[in-house]
Amino acid sequence: MPKSQFLDPNVARHSGEITFKPIPVNQYNKTIAQEKKNFSTEDFKRIYHDMVVIREFETMINLIKTTGEYSGIKYDHPGPAHLSIGQEAAAVGMAYTLTVDDFIFGSHRSHGEILAKGLSAIHKLDDAQLMNVMENFFDGTILKIVKKGFTGSVKELGRRFLLYGTLAEIFARETGFNKGLGGSMHAFFTPFGVYPNNAIVGGSGDIAVGAALYKKVNSKPGMVVANIGDASMACGPVWEGITFAAMDQFEQLWQGAMKGGLPVIFNIMNNLYGMGGQTCGETMGYGMPARIGAGVNPDQMHAERVDGYNPLAVIDAYNRKRKIIEDKKGPVLLEVLTYRVSGHSPSDSSSYRSKEEIEAWQKQDCIEAFGQELIKAKVATQSDLSAIWTDVKAIIREMFINSIDLEISPRMDIKNHPEQIGEMIFSNESVDKMEDRTPEVNHPMAENPRVIQISKKERFAYDAEGKPFSKMKQYQLRDGIFEAIVDRFYKDPTLIAYGEDNRDWGGAFAVYRGLTEALPYNRFFNSPISEASIVGTAIGYAMCGGRVIPEIMYCDFLGRCGDEVFNQLPKWQAMSGNVLKMPVVLRVSVGSKYGAQHSQDWTSLVAHIPGLKVCFPVTPYDAKGLMNSALQGTDPVVFFESQRIYDIGEQFHKGGVPEGYYEIPFGEPDVKREGKDVTILTIGATLYRALEAAKILEEKYGMSAEVIDARSLVPFNYEKVIASVKKTGRILISGDATARGSFLNDLARNITELAFDYLDAPPVVVGSRNWITPAYELEEAFFPQPEWFIDAIHEKIVPLKGHVSGQNFSDLEQIRRNKLGI
Ligand SMILES: Cc1ncc(C[n+]2csc(CCOP(=O)(O)OP(=O)(O)O)c2C)c(N)n1
Ligand SMILES: [Mg+2]
């Protein structure tokens, strides 16, 4: 139902002031003696142990990077290593209370967080559950390695499993947690609640929010922690993630069990530095990151700074913050103060900070200080602590030896299986629904006003005499997209859709009209104007097991979610070692009429990125069939639509657009008009101008053109195009993308190579000019027009008798334009 929230001018215009509550700073002040009632001796020792594991693990890698050996064993690790020596208490404190159902996301400096969360999960899982995880992960491959010759407990086995899997991943072994395709900066292990770490700093800022959205919408237990660096607090995705997480609608519009805030904690690991930039005093203005909470919402995100040099202070904060999350009062902002004693990376000469400063922090070392407190409180003796160190060093040494042995821990055998990485780029699955339960909807589909309205439309554009029905009567392209989407909403309970002005407005171009009536807020809602978080949250949502349709209103706005579209959406399936799936259908509308920043066709840009499927259907039949395929799959799809033709009827598929479900496979171009003298291959709405050109060619020059609609860009099957070229010997390729560096050129190159023997002339590309898109009234000078096709054929392929070109397609002009870069 449309919302009804009256905005009263008398209230809005009332004078007053905004007040802020104090934000707590390092207020924890309990002693170990006081904490004895909350922690057993074993608990205290476990905290110490977990910190020692991280310290020794990072020290090992530091030694390998700086001296080429550890514990007398030589090894060369050319890859990255962003270590967190000094930050152990912050990591262990963060992870200690988390359950296996709680997920953490992080960044490049996450070894400590992976180990802390992994150890916490191993402690919480019972033996049977833990064995089950280990036996089932990659068919027990890692378990077999760490079990060999080992006779200890299941928990001990778990610890070996965690250390080995992480280390093998860092060293790019196929036996690592992500088959060696993630590496140091991206390693993760979802069965322990460790979710992707991001080398694009701040990248987890919106992805983690999507994971929290998944938990909320699908009623899954647990919360999500986004571990973000203090310097990355400046990054767009972090701010956009916070904005998204703090939307009023969760409290004010979402209903029933869905009402209330997102279960997410932004955990700012404040080690006071970026690489070398000092966040307090130089590169940021917040003084303390916790301050930011004050500006976000009236709850001030329940922000506070806690002392991350004391693990108990962090644990105390997490116990309090969990209550807030369970009360559905999230999001929470927690600043955990810490210090990185190690360099940003092992090559760091620490030119940006003084020796005195490092030494001052080392004097208060979190592990040393905690150990002394344990001894003072008689919880442990020095020899207890020494025994922990001895034990940890021994296991790390053993796992190190195993992980560098090429027999035990081989790399991916790319020589013998050269396509192995290629095969991991897409999951190519066909899945009706991501979970088996009844989808939540407001009414039966047949009662939906849009569905009823569409049922009265003509599903083919022309009547029996070939006369077109009126626009209002025709089943339109937007109806095709709607039908596929609404069908999936009634099939897949995990499916959600959102974007700017999606709900009451019906989407900026009325594709979604009717969905507001059909779906509750928790399945269909308006997002903030925040393209990064629209896509980023969708990525997090899909990673956790849901299916999602984010929407970007204008293609030009893709730049605003560049990182999400270029680095996140396409890469995580392969980077995870195929642990993750990515069923995200990103709808992108290509504009026209609105000038330079609202009319760009960026299909080429997206097609360039490995890991994305890309399509651009331009008929109602194709739009419905391809959307059905996209929504049946488990791969990320960028689904382009054109604002020129949302209202176009079906002119090609005889019998009209079927009412029932059907799929059009990705990658299959479609012959929209048969011909024998020249092939015209188009991408997007250019099809209709190519058909006009074909008509002119026929009528004026007696030339019969075959027009092929690419429909998909990635994947793309060339066979049908080659078959056409075999017949015609000529091909012109066109689309609305600016020609330079375009997918059009890619098509031309491949066709040249694949059909060279059949071509009478090189393939000709007719794209848009390499300019800004001008105002609507001047668009004809920019986008390919029907006459341009004729001119290009005349000048570059075969002279047309009596034709005088309007456009200059001569070689000289081509050289001139390229010289000028236009
Ligand atoms: C988007 C992006 N910009 C820059 C970098 C290079 N870089 C890697 S780590 C880092 C500093 C990050 O500082 P912070 O967020 O405080 O995390 P810390 O390194 O202190 O753990 C920078 C600039 C990057 N990886 N990603
Ligand atoms: Mg930092």
Image: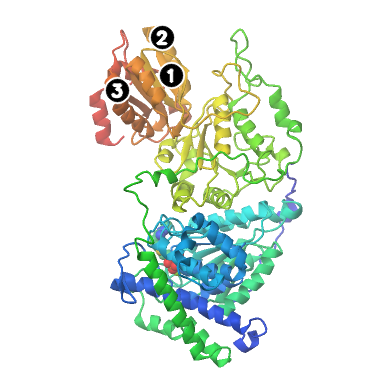
Image coordinates of residue 600 in percent, x first then y, are 45, 36
Q: Position of residue 207 (x, y in %)?
A: 54, 55
Task: State the image coordinates of residue 300 (x, y, percent, origin top left).
Answer: 63, 66
Q: Which mark is residue 809?
A: 3
In the image, what residue type sits under mark 2? Glu
Residue placed most toward the observer, 561 or 18: 561
Spatial CA distance of label 2 from label 3 is 21 Å
Mark 1 secondary-structure assignment: strand
Tag 1 residue: 707
The residue pinned by badge 2 equals: 698
Tag 1: amino acid: Val
Based on the displayed image, in which of its 4 quarters is residue 149 positioned? bottom left
Marks 2 and 3: which is nearer the front? 2
Q: Looking at the image, in which quadrant does ligand 1 appear?
A: bottom left
- For the residues labelled 3 and 1, say whether their Cβ atoms are less than 8 Å apart: no
Query: Which quarter of the figure is the N terminus placed in?
Result: top right
Upstream in sequence: badge 2 or badge 1: 2
Question: Label 2: few (<14), some or many (≥20) within 10 Å?
Answer: some
Determine crowd level at label 1: few under 14, some 14-19, many 20+ residues with C-alpha closer than 10 A: many
- State the count of labels: 3
Kind of element beneath mark 3: loop
